[in-house]
């Protein structure tokens, strides 16, 4: 079995690997927003940064899981591959957006 067969095989990566690949960029976005706050407002809870650090990587992981689930369609090639890649991108971006809104609810997005 050569490397090309492994790369092109459906579900070449495990669900956990896809979920980690989805959660790491979401965590980076959360950290970007958290570190952009120099002086948090006094009405925010003491540990306001915990919620986005939990919610956003979870949302990214669910986007990665969606990529894993739709991977069998992508493996068919041709137009299916392109449509699945576009669908995966849209699902991930919408999920990340919802994670940002839910993660920073009551603090940055009040």
Image (cartoon, helix red, strand yellow):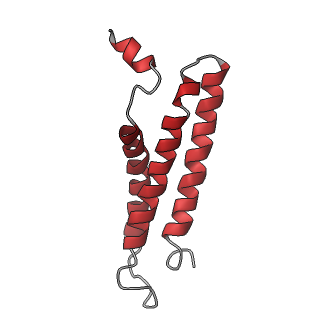
Q: Residue at x 56, y 33 (%)?
A: 70
Percent of width and height locating residue 99: 52, 61
Where, by quadrant of the figure, is residue 73 drawn? top right
Quarter residue 90 falls in: top right
Left or right? Give the position of 98 relative to 12.
right
Task: Measuring from the top left, give residue 56's x and y in whole percent.
Answer: 45, 60
What residue do we see at 38% from left, 73% from top? 49
Q: Which quadrant: the N terminus?
A: top left
Does residue 35 sit above or below 88 in this rendering? Answer: below
The residue located at (44%, 53%) in the rendering is 26
6 above or below 45?
above
Residue 91: quarter of image: top right
Q: Position of residue 45 (x, y in %)?
A: 41, 85
Viewport quadrant of the C terminus: bottom right
Residue 36 in view: no
The front one of 34 and 84 is 84
Q: Position of residue 39 (x, y in %)?
A: 39, 82
77 or 16: which is nearer to us? 16
Point 40% across, 12% down: residue: 5
**Quick one: which residue is furthest to the top in this view?**
1
Apparent side of residue 69 relative to residue 7 in the rendered image (left or right)? right
Q: How many marks?
A: 0
Q: Is residue 81 left or right of residue 59?
A: right
Query: Vertically, is 107 above or below 59?
Result: below
Above or below residue 91? Residue 7 is above
Asked whether residue 37 appears in the rendered view, the answer is yes
């Amino acid at each position: 079995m050569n490397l090309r067969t492994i790369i092109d095989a459906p579900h070449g990566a495990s669900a956990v690997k896809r979920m980690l690949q989805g959660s790491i960029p979401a965590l980076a976005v959360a950290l970007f927003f958290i570190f952009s706050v120099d002086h948090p407002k006094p009405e925010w809870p003491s540990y306001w940064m915990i919620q986005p650090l939990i919610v956003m990587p979870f949302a990214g992981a669910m986007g990665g899981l969606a990529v894993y689930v739709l991977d069998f369609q992508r493996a068919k090639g041709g137009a299916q591959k392109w449509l699945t890649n576009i669908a995966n991108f849209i699902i991930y971006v919408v999920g990340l957006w919802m994670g940002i809104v839910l993660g920073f609810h009551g603090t940055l997005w009040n």
